[in-house]
Each structure stands twice: as structure tokens, then as C-alpha cells.
Image (cartoon, grey):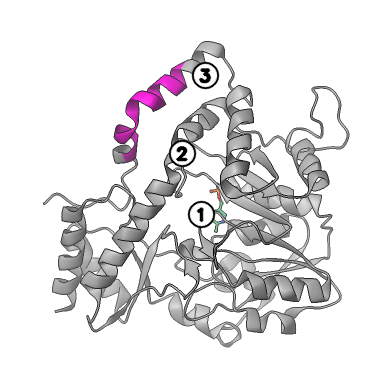
Amino acid sequence: MAAVPFVDLHAQYLSIKPEIDEAIARVIATSSFVRGPDVESFEAEYSTLMGAQHTVSCANGTDAIYIAMKALGIKPGDEVITTAQTWISTSETIGQHGAKPIFVDIDPVTSTIDVSKIEEKITSRTVGIIPVHLYGQMADMPAVMALAEKHGLWVIEDCAQAHLATIDGRKAGSFGNIATWSFYPGKNLGAMGDAGAITTDDAALARHMACFARHGGLVKGDHEMEGINSRLDGLQAAILNVKLPRLAGWTAQRRAIAKRYDAQLSGISGIALPTEVEGREHVYHLYVIEADDRDGLAAALKERGVPTVVNYKRALPFLPCYAHLGHRPEDFPVAYRLQDRILSLPIFAELTEAQQDHVAAAVREALA
Ligand SMILES: *Cc1c(COP(=O)(O)O)cnc(C)c1O
């Protein structure tokens, strides 16, 4: 069989081509390129689907985190607690406000922030916590919120990988003061370019974030504050409006594919499969296995037409951009150990059974 793609964005496009083409043509015909009616309807529909009072769209998921912190009043010298293992957006935006990211090691089962190690990192300068629902499984939000309340901290949930994930039936994004979302093309809900959003139940925060993202005002020329330019394009909103009603179905497909991998790959020595914790519904943005010889397995899979990715090859505390913080491997033993063991296998809603069989057979052969 032909090589299996890691993600096949074109397959998803073909499955909804007439509607996407029509939506794009309509935006072009009306020249509603920045914000406009599709953006307004997307914000309303996204709030409904996520169970949030307000959605503020913006240019990407990184800006979403930056804008959220700004609205919560972050200032230089503040400390923000976050996880050692995530995409750089979560921590680079803390630094962009002149604040300091305080990393916490990850839980060995879920790879999300280890809540039992948060309290020892709280100081008089700590203002908030940013947990990340990594790979599509939620962090232990009830425990994070209990700590935040005890210490008077705000919480921003980085939901970029976790659209429709739940914990005890409650959705990602519904716990913290603010939740941030990415619609980068490869995310579970992906645009055809950069796009992002912020959700909250707090009307004042929503208004502040909307103003800040739009040059400091909701009406052209009325600048209530200095802001930034981080708006959603009409084309991206129109595309997202076509995709949004399908998100639940695509999520169910991702979960079914993950269950199939679980069955196909169980009992193979040299690897460990992802764990879905009781009570949490994982949405499998990524299907991340652990391998004793990760690089050897990746090379053997590549030879067999199976591309893999390492998400992410260096845990944040060990990146060159944080060398000045002087972190040592023993400060984050779990993140340090996992960075050389993790490997993401192809997963996307349109992955066929034949393609999946090919991946599973390649893994078995490579480790035989
Ligand atoms: C993708 C991602 C982001 C950033 O989203 P962009 O839209 O690419 O800016 C932030 N956090 C996490 C965990 C992500 O995976």
C-alpha cells in the first residue's frame, strides 16, 4: 500500500468539498475578509457547542493565550505555573508579558501537569496556572481548580488539542477563568490557515479581550486601550462554520481509531500505549506511544511507509530558550525521561481501516 500520511488534510476537504467551496466563494463575493457575518455566527455557534457564555475569536491559538493573560492583568515580574511538556506557545506568551514561566513536571500516566507538584512552586509572585490538555486528554481540572481557589490564582485552560474532551462529563474549557483554542489546520477542528478563539463565562473579561484583540476597541476609531491586531478572517470563519457541526462525529472517529490501535498494538514488548484515565474522554488529537528504542522504531516505521512525529522532542525546561533558567534533568524527571520515549502514530478522522492495519502491522514487524 502507498505510504500512510501522518495527517491527511486533503481527505477531510474532499469529504466536504461542495460546502467548503461554496462558503469560500460567498466570502469572496461579499468581500467580508476580516471579521464579518461568518465570524459573528462562528462565535455564537462555538459558544453553544462548548457550553461557554462568550467566544472571542482571534488570529491563532498562541495569541489567544497572550490575550487571555493580558485581560487577567498579568504584569512584568509575575510568575505563571505551567506544564513542562507542551507546545512552546503556552510558555512563550508568559515571557512576552515580562512574566516568568514556572514549570511543573508531568504526570507519568497522562503527560499533563502533575497537580501534586504545583503547590511547592507557588510563591508570593504567582498569579495563575495554565494547564494544558495535552494530546487530547484533560489535565486533572477539579484538582487544579481547588488549588487555584485556595491560593487566589487565575486559571487559563490551554485547550488547543482538546476540543470536546471531557472529565466526568464536563467539557474542556468549562473549568478555568478562560479557555484558549487553536484552529491550526492539523488540530481536531482545523481552519485552512491560522485561526484561534478564547472562551469564558465572564462578560467583562470577554469584552476586554475582544477590545484588546481589535486594536483596543469594538467600534472602528474608538480605542479604549492600546491593543493588538489579532482578528479572525472571514474565510477561516466560513470554513470553520462548515466544519463545526461535524466535530462531534470526527471526534467519535478519532476515538474509535484509538480503540482499534489499543487492540491491535496491545501485548507488544518494547512499547507502551496511551492510557485513557477513568472518567476522562480523550479526543486523541495525537496517539502517543512510548518506545524503549524510540528512534530505532521511528526509522523502521519510516522504511515501511509509516511517518511518525515526536511531540515534542525537548521538554520546555530543557530548550535553549530556557537555558538561562538553569533547569536540570532531575528537576523534571518524568518529562526528561519521556522526551526520548514518545512517538506519535498517524491518527485523523479519515484514517481508513486499511491504512490503520498497515500502521499496526509495521509496528509489529519493526519490533518482532
Ligand atoms: C497548537 C497549540 C497552540 C497554539 O496554537 P496556534 O494556533 O498554532 O498558535 C497552543 N498550545 C498548544 C498546546 C498547541 O498544541
| Residue type of the residue flagged with mark 2 | Pro
Question: How packed is label 2: few (under 14 Cα within 10 Å), some, or many (20 or more)?
Answer: few
Q: Which residue is drawn at the image coordinates 77% and 33% (left, top)?
A: 215
Front-most of residues 70 and 247 = 247
Residue 320 placement (x, y as % from top left): 57, 67
Mark 1 residue's CB less than 8 Å from ligand 1:
no
Mark drawn on residue 27: 3
Residue 308 appears in the rendering: no
24 drawn magenta: yes
Query: Magenta region: which residues?
Result: 12-25
Q: Is the stretch drawn in magenta largely helix, strand or loop?
A: helix
| Residue type of the residue flagged with mark 1 | Leu
- Label 2: which residue? 245
Residue 256 placement (x, y as % from top left): 31, 59
Q: How many numbered discs sit on the rendered protein?
A: 3
Q: Quadrant of the C terminus?
A: bottom left
Front-most of residues 257 and 33 = 257
